Amino acid sequence: MIRFICIVIFVILFLIVTIPVLIIESVLHKFRPYASDISSLRIVQWAFKVIIRIAGVDVTVIGEENIPDEPVLFTGNHRSYFDIVLTYSRCSRVTGYIAKKEMNRYLTLSWWMRMLHCLFLDRKDPKEGLKTILQAIDDVKNGISIFVFPEGTRNDGEELSMLPFRDGAFKIATKSGCAIVPVSMNNTAEIFENHLPRIKKTHVILEYGQPIYPNELDKETKKHIGEYVERIIRETIHKNVELV
């Protein structure tokens, strides 16, 4: 419980203390958008690294060199709230996450998310969902990477289970031509979700796969690209279970 309480206190303090920083970043963004993007990224990454340290999470990272120096679509399996903390703390480029629209209600948090080019997806409204995908395509074309969890929600099943990947998210890559980078995570639910409300010192595996360029795939594979990427991640988390 001590780790949980410490993280809650840290997050609350961060969201309150950084309100003036957000105001400065918003003004800076009007005149020097790239500088604002990078400084916002580094500030939030610092906070996430502090959270990881407080939680006592030991991360083994594999294949980070596979990430090309260009905007990409990151796609990962999703079992924990910490998946975002772990992956975002390692982004070298400006990266926006696609989050459920309910996150937009949390004032300072949603303000930070918008500064970081996060997009809010209404999963119940197909038209609004399409607008979100179109915005993500534009963001990639403008040099911003996008991170999405194609399962559509956090999977609370068995450790190596995965929900089917939804194909809609992959239009971001097929329409923009960017690479898809599979992100496979092992043991992240053991940090928090498996024993709420305790946060437990945990070893997790984070592996970045080889980039996949949709235009280089054969017609049939491209048609079922969601299944293709899902299979790669599924095979990877099964492979890495021995490393946990």
Image: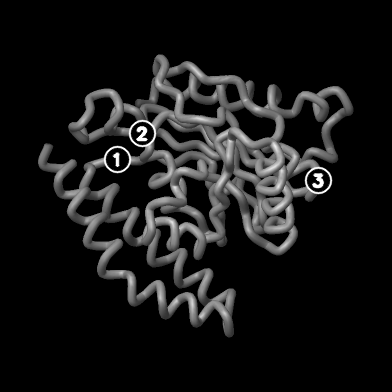
Q: Is residue 146 above or below residue 31?
A: above
Left or right of residue 224, residue 66 in this image: left
Left or right of residue 202, residue 141 in this image: right
Marks 2/1 in contact by CB < 8 Å: the verdict is yes
Measure the C-alpha gap from mark 2 to mark 3. 33 Å
- Which residue is painted at 66% across and 50% down in the image? 72
Q: Observer-nearest residue: 119 or 101?
A: 101
From the image, tell me which residue sits under label 3: 175
Marks 1/3 in contact by CB < 8 Å: the verdict is no
Instruction: Name the secondary structure under disc 2.
Output: strand
Q: Which mark sits nearer the N-terminus, 1 or 3?
A: 1
Q: Is residue 205 above or below residue 117?
A: above
From the image, tell me which residue sits under label 1: 58
Residue 220: percent from left, percent from top: 86, 23
Callout count: 3
From the image, tell me which residue sits under label 2: 204
The way the protein has been coloured in the rendering is one colour
Left or right of residue 219, residue 238 in this image: left
Measure the C-alpha gap from mark 2 to mark 1. 6 Å
